[in-house]
Image (cartoon, rainbow, N blue to C red):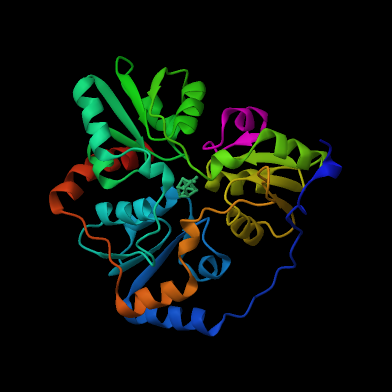
Amino acid sequence: MSANDLNYEPMVFSPKTKGERSLSDIQKEILSLKKERNAVILAHNYQIEAIQEIADFVGDSLGLAYNAEATDADIIVFCGVHFMAETAKIVNPNKTVLLPDLDAGCSLSDSCPEKKLEAYKQANPEVYVVAYINCSAGVKALSDVICTSGNAKKIVDRVPKEKEILFVPDQNLGKWVSEQTGRPMQLWPGSCYAHVLFTQNAIERLKAKFPSALVVAHPECVQTVRDNADIVCSTEKMVHFCKDSQSESFIIITETGMIHRLQREIPEKTFIAGPTDSCACNECRFMKMNTIEKLRNCLRDLTPEIELPADLTKRAYMPLKRMLDWSK
Ligand code: 13P
Ligand code: SF4
């Protein structure tokens, strides 16, 4: 198949002229509710543009965890998925943490149920569990240390050499970190349903149309995609890489919402959405459950709220705190 055979129109985000975009009525309403409630809005890079525009902080899982820990607001409204809001609650148990849609889960997190990990640990008590932050509070509580895609290498490098590492739940990120660190690991067989949809074949067909564009991929992608990318990194590092690079255009192999952040920070460059075999872009259905209306409603009604048993919060905090300390 050649580039001419693309079965979709590539999604190209051309350079933007800088300028203030006026806020919609509902965005203004959210900002006024936020002030009234003394709330902070934290948003992941994959959220819709209207949410990113009014968030106090937009970033990757690591930046969001630090911001959740540091905030002095009374209420944290977390625009992301459930495990991220849970993380905010774990580092800040006395604050109210709201998630606009409580059903905004994560297939990767679901691929490692707490009970299964518990059984595995009972059968293999010697393992040192490094858990990617995309997991439930229950799984965090069973882990020795947490990592994100932004600090995974740094964290694994700190694990005592004599320990046998079990990396959960993402086998793709785990394999990548193992290659980066030279550290053999047992890999939990989980994956992100959205990132595994990117194929090298689809990327090559797009690349033939945009030969000078650099390929920027998330480590949750499969090995062939990672091996052929110009860089593999977390969503936050994508911003730095594209800013610092001499290149003018980039194919972004991660959830398409990332391009809003890139365009806001680097309006003078061109970003092309990463393709799957059948589609020009790739959205995470869980991330997209948060809408601007649900964000307004949750700030107005102070629900849905993340609630966690105190003992679970305590147990999940220890490996999370270790990550925050090791990653400074
Ligand atoms: P980042 O930590 O790179 O933002 O990734 C989070 C995520 O869910 C990727 O699918
Ligand atoms: Fe989870 Fe994948 Fe969505 Fe990230 S993109 S939140 S890993 S399902």
The magenta segment = 218-233
Residue depicted at 25% across the width and 52% down the height: 90
Which image quadrant is residue 238 in?
A: top right
Number of numbered labels in the structure image: 0
Query: In screen coordinates, is 241 left or right of 157?
Result: right
User: What percent of the width, then of the height, locates residue 98?
Assistant: 32, 66
Q: Name the foreground residue: 71 vs 190.
A: 190
Q: Residue at x 27, y 56 (%)?
A: 89
Above or below residue 180? Residue 282 is below
Where in the figure is residue 111, as x and y percent of width and height?
A: 38, 39
Point out the image quarter for the C terminus: top left
Farthest-out residue, right: 4
Q: Position of 174 compared to 39: left or right? A: right
**Percent x, y for residue 286?**
46, 56
Q: At x 34% / y 35%, what residue is drawn?
A: 131
Q: Quadrant of residue 188?
A: top left
**In the displayed structure, would residue 136 be above or below residue 17?**
above
Residue 155 on the magenta segment: no
- The percent coordinates of residue 137 (x first, y second) are 27, 46
Side of 9 where 200 appears, left or right: left
Position of residue 221 relative to residue 256, above or below, is: above
Is residue 326 or residue 282 the one in the foreground?
A: 282
